[in-house]
Amino acid sequence: MASELKQRARRFPKEPGVYLMKDGRGEVIYIGKAKDLRARVLNYFTGADERAQVKFLLQKVERIEPIVTRSEEQAFILERDLISKHKPRYNIRLKDDKAYLSIKIDLNQPWPRLELVRKISSDGARYFGPYTFSYEMRNLLEVIKRAVPLRTCSDTVFYNRTRPCLEYQIKRCAGPCCLPVDREVYLEWVKQAISILEGKSEALSKKLEAQMESASGRLQFEEAAVLRDRIQALRNAKTNQEMISSDLEDRDYFSHSREGKLASVSVLRTRFGRIADTANFAFNDVVVSDQELLSSVIGQFYDEARGFPREIIVPYVLSDSELLETVLSRRAGFAVSLVVPERGVKHRLLKLAEVNARQNFSMNFEEEANAALAVKELALKLKLKQIPRKIECIDVSNLQGSDIVGAVISFYDGKPEKESYKRYNISFSGKPDDFAAIHEVVSRRLQAGLQDGDLPDLLVIDGGAGQLAKALQVRDALKINIEIIALAKGRAERSGETSRKAAASKPERVFVEESSVPIALASEDIATLFIQRVRDEAHRFVLSFHRQKRSKRALRSVLDTISGIGPDRRARLLRAFGSVDAMKDAPLEDLAKAGRMSKLLAEKVKKRLN
Ligand code: SF4
């Protein structure tokens, strides 16, 4: 396929444009832009692009389609539009979180409150915002909460309380839900909140100061103290946010953190010398370079609602810096430049964005990163030829020698891929045993994999040397080049001993092809924990399949003894309920409906089951 695609790419125009990569089903899986379409696409096939992710992407691509544009700038815009239309799996795509928050005050309510909403409606209420910077909005709300004792509860809570809540105890609310609060006074507070939202907190401070003095003059010291605290809250709001830069230019700082296909990008936005906002994005199928990742995020981040800064600070020079500057400046209506700082405040803030990106990465991908590390460790310990991405594990179950079944579970990049799990009913011609069952499941799985071009990188067999030998026999007969290992339970676990000491003295053993001596795995090692998880998942899955089968068989034999239940009706009931218990618990009407039978017969069935 790669050579056909390469041939086709040779005929691409040497013009700027966009290329669409499609998979076997015709789905667009990646969209890229290029100054020279032919050179860019050929790059994927000449080995000039050595990124491991490129190889991965090419395995999935079956067709590449070019679209020529008049300029590189037009290609940039078209790429962005096509990405948002097709939503390709391997493109960097910012989720549309552009429904900014607004603050709503409904003055038609008897006891108005401040509400956060994402939609402004024409419902007669007053709206403030939308706020592009969430910091700004959060600060405002905090100031209002401290300066004005309005209720914060929802209407449901408000009309159902029997006592004021904690807000009342900490003097943040006057408690109109249950206490006799003067409505005139409350509405005056609402007006004060509106003054703050309108940016008139200075005037409000003065008004409150006058009220405080008047209260002191009347020897109303408690009232004066409350007013003093509110004035203080308003003043604090102004000094609360530290100035981080004396020059007041608007800047956005972009940084990222990445491991393989997992990445996170953070944006730190400064306005008037203060941190105004941050935004974090996480991506888990990144097949482009770090530079392309940042370019894509920057290219999609800005719009009129979000606003444009004069400077965008990045950790290194991006290959399409100039293009980004041209496009963003045109849209902003003023010059926007990309800057790489080497020292000073900008450098320090860029580092801060980097810390945010790292933190965001671990919040999003801790589990994935650990799984990737565990797989890597496992490959090292077992001296595998490659770090396996797709690992499958086979287990069989023949509890009490009946209904022998097998199952294959699958992990991709260290995570279970449940949609790929498979179940097998085993059919023996000879005497059933574990080895023969493994032989059959491996054989059926690998033959199907050969046909569909979907084979695992590593196959794990639950068992010892004998089971491994059977699996290898199948693999070699089919001439398939995949690695197979067998994992045998630690003797401590088999004998029911579960203490750490017992586990350490009788560890799990892995049988590999090249050695007759199994490799013992350290009990608390990350690789051991991972491979145990894979094996346990296979075990869980095959057992649940086995139980289901037995239960269905039990149900079938009960149904066979009831007159009026023929093969069709029996099949319908088995399909609908699957087990004696499920059928026992089902309402009579459901039973009658599923079996298309009279209530009388349904009652008879129920009686027999009980
Ligand atoms: S004290 Fe009453 S009115 Fe105030 S927030 Fe609590 S529940 Fe709402």
Image (spheres, rainbow, N blue to C red):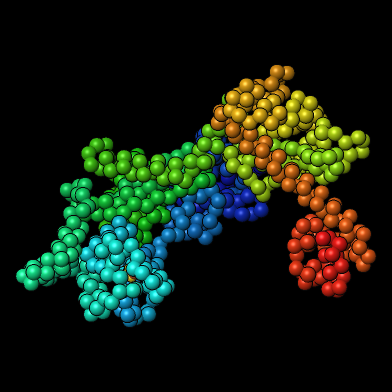
The x and y percentages for residue 226 are 18, 65
Image quadrant of ligand 1? bottom left
Provide residue 91's location: percent of width, then percent of height: 51, 50
Front in this rendered view, residue 570 or 196: 570
Q: Residue at x 85, y 52 (%)?
A: 553
Q: Residue at x 92, y 38 (%)?
A: 429
- Evaluate whether residue 169 shows in this view: yes
> Is residue 143 rendered to the left or right of residue 546?
left
Query: Which quadrant would the C terminus be assigned to in this image?
Result: bottom right
Decide which of 475, 497 is in the foreground and name it.
497
Q: Percent from the top left, x then y, of residue 273?
A: 21, 51
Vertical placement of residue 341 versus 201, above or below:
above
Q: Is residue 343 left or right of 396 when viewed as pictured?
A: left
Percent coordinates x, y for residue 299 in the rendering: 40, 53
Is residue 336 in view from this perspective? no
Outermost residue on the left side: it is 217
Using the image, determine if residue 516 lies above or below residue 12: above
